[in-house]
Amino acid sequence: MSRARQPPLVTGISPNEGTPWTKVTIRGENLGTGPNDLTGLSICGHNCLLTAEWMSASKIVCRVGPAKDDKGEIIVTTRSGGRGTSTVSFKLLKPERIGILDQSAVWVDELNYYDMRTDRNKGISPLSLRPANPLGIDIDKGNVALKDIEIMFPGMSGDFTSENFSATWYLIENHSSTSFDQLRLAVGNLKKQASKKNEGSLAYVKGGLSTFFEAQDALAAIHQKLESDGTEKVEGSMTQRLENVLNRASETADTLFQEVLGRKDKADSTRNALNVLQRFKFLFSLPLNIERNIRKGDYDVVINDYEKAKSLFGNTEVPVFKKVYSEVETRIDALRKLLLDKLLEMPSTLHDQKRYIRYLSDLHAPGDPAWQCIVAQHKWILQLMQNCKEDLIKEQKVSGVGLGQDRSLALSRISLSAPVKRGGSFQTPKDDSWHYKSPQQVRFVEKLSDVVISQLPNFWKLWISYVNGSLFSETGEKSGQVEKSKKNARQRQSDFKGMIEEVTRRLVQFVRGALLPSSLNDLELRQYGGWDIKTPLIGAWLTQVIHTVRLSHEALSALEIPNDLLQVIHDLLQDLRVHCLLITLQHTEEDVKRLAEKEDWVVDNEGITSLPSQFEQCMAQMLQSLKEPMECKPGEINILNLNVVQDKAFEQCVAIMKVFIKCLEQLSTKTDGDIDTSHLSVDLASPDLFGSINEDLSPKPEQHLLIILSNCQYLERHTFLNLAEHLEKNNFTTAEKIIRVSIEAVRQLDEHLFETYIEKKSDPIVGSLEPGIYAGYFDWKDCQPPIGVRSYLKEALVSIISVHAEVFAVSKELVPRVLSKIIEAVAEEMSRLMQCVSSFSKNGALQARLEICALQDAIEPFLTSESRTSFKQAIEALPQLQNGADKKLLEELLNKFKSSMKLQLNCFKPTSFQPVKR
């Protein structure tokens, strides 16, 4: 007992709005088992069953009637499911009113005409339908009497619909007081109306194309029907037959009296023949009826008549009957050949194939027509796939468009995208200008998938019908043929499995030849390759290909084809996903290499340029593009769980990171001449502590080092951590290892650049100390009493202050780290110089202590344990103060130094800076 069907459910209608008589496509579920099962269809309350055309259980096509409701549901009623429901609605638009003189591609109800003069609906003459104001300007009638106008224009009329219309009469009657400017405006309005009328013809043709086509199809069908009902091809034309009858009548009349004696015998024989013909009329007229019904396509009638004739006259011994029956067999043989040709002719619908197979079975055709059809359709599918490849390869050679253009266009799109702000989120740029033709390989995969999806389902269903015997009987009668069909199907099951394997294998091999040629051997490449692959497809196109192949696999899985036959498609999908991942990573590496060209050296308040954000944007864009290929659909695995893929992805990700770090290193060594400064700008929020503003705004090499150092710190503290989170979200199992290696690499670059900068800045300061101390033949053993800190120390402090200003202008976070290192070098040099002195006089010891203490007090916030140790060793190398007067003098001179250099030493005041030890 079969279960009751679910009520019809309408889930979609296209279009969802339109005027009456609009052709719509209704989609849904359980929309009936066939045309006879559909008993009702209403849209917005109007019955549309008369125009309904049942296509399948999920699709109905019909026309919307003139319903009263503006908006309503679509209700389908079937015998099997009853009255259904709808989740969508249709909006009925009011049709544009068509005037009596307007062109229309559809029938217009002319019972009621719209009178523009009174703005009312009433029955009037079509000639009175006219616009009240054809000139489009205000009517300004004068005082001219109508009688006077009739006298001036005898036999004429002011009605522009009249044959005797006079334009002068119309202007005097309606616009005698109108200004000249208004009349010029009226001329313009008339020209516009004429132009609109000319354009209306083209719009009328375009708008009525569908109606024209439907009318043409209807006329062609009527013409074909009329031709098929005639007998011209069997007996000749009607006039020819009439002529033959008349000729025979004339000859008979001439010989009437010459054969009087033989007339009776002929009459008797004729009467007997007529009796036989009348008695066996069915058999004698059967050959003609067979040909007539074949032309009509009424094969069922032919088969029934043949079965009847065979049962009655199949074993007859009467010569006349045997002769007529042989003619019947001759025509039936021709019918078998015709039906077999139609069956093997491709393309063909599944319904027609089943019909022809049943006809051939009923006609006892030799062989196995069903299996012949299956073999023919298999060859047809394979040929379609081959033709698809050859057409696209020929198009590629003709167009000569290489994939490099696609890559360059893609890169230009990326370069036009706005940079991501720190702390913001990445979004794919919506640039409508990026719409260029997809590569031939991508369109080939799409067309190839369309071929397989459109052909293989019917092929599979035909085989299923062959297996269960439903090709020959829907209700179970003809059990002998059904059993024979099942027996043949069991014997050919392995052959059909080989056909399905061949189709899926060729689908996979064709795709591999277009996108993964390295996975094929030389012989397979010659058969399935031939593409001009100059540059691999970018990840976006590969993602589209993966999406297409997945849809194909889902469509074939829905047919309940065994999974082992579809395994090759699974393997192809896995290889495509791996290829897409690696290609995307490679292209990202190329994109990252170009980031150095985008460095503008504009530093924000945090001392960071846009380069780290651009790098993070590039990586985020890569991960976004990999989201669909990396997603695991049912039956798929995470490709990053494969050891080989995991290792390659790790190596490629680390390579991307190192390429970016290499870019930073290259930028740090560029000279002013190597850098395009035409686009540089100054951040006014950063104070200028150099004392004067350079006219040249280009960063100096030392500033390059500082900017790159600041970017390195930001990478380590923020960017890499963000990327680690992104990688983990996208199932990169080695994300932690990738970031760890990247941080180690950026730290090495940071240390190298930092040492380079410290060396450039500290060497001049340290080198100036010893010459400054002994300037003017100064001798620690023989010197004057100290009167203050000498100039060499002040110059050293000013040099340190200039370094402070230079670093602060880029990044205040770098100030403690840089100054602490420079001060360590200065303190170490002072300690060495003091320890090298053999002996000090009293004044010399006091002078040395004054300068060491002044230096130490000035840079106190940036002292580290190493620099404190150096200063302590320098003090210990000096003789102790002898009395309180020396201590007092030392304190007074220190205060004097601090007071005189108060402004300069403000930058060394304790702030939020803390010494940094790396």
Image (spheres, grey):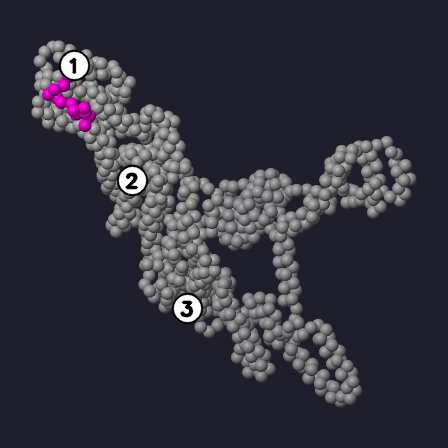
Q: Quadrant of residue 160?
A: top right
Task: Name the secondary structure under disc 3.
Answer: helix
Labels 3, 2: front one: 2
Q: Position of residue 748 (x, y in %)?
A: 22, 39
Q: CA distance from mark 3 to mark 1?
A: 124 Å
**Which residue is most to the right?**
151
**Earlier along the polypeptide chain: callout 3 or callout 1?**
3
- Packing grade of label 2 (10 A; few <14, some 14-19, many >=20) is some
Q: Residue 326 at x, y = what percent?
A: 56, 79
Residue at the spot of label 3: 484
Nearest to viewer (mark 2 / mark 1): 1
Q: Is residue 313 visible?
A: no
- Residue 781 inside the magenta-drawn segment: yes
Where is residue 262 shown, x and y percent of the image?
73, 88
Q: What stretch of residues is rendered in magenta?
A: 771-786
Q: Position of residue 767 (x, y in %)?
A: 20, 30
Please name the residue shown 38% across and 50% down the image: 538
Q: Which residue is mark 2?
A: 669
Name the residue that disc number 1 marks.
890
Quarter of the C terminus within the rendering: top left
Q: Residues within 10 Å of mark 1 (few under 14, many from 20)?
A: many
Q: Residue furthest front?
A: 777
Q: What is the number of callouts on the image? A: 3
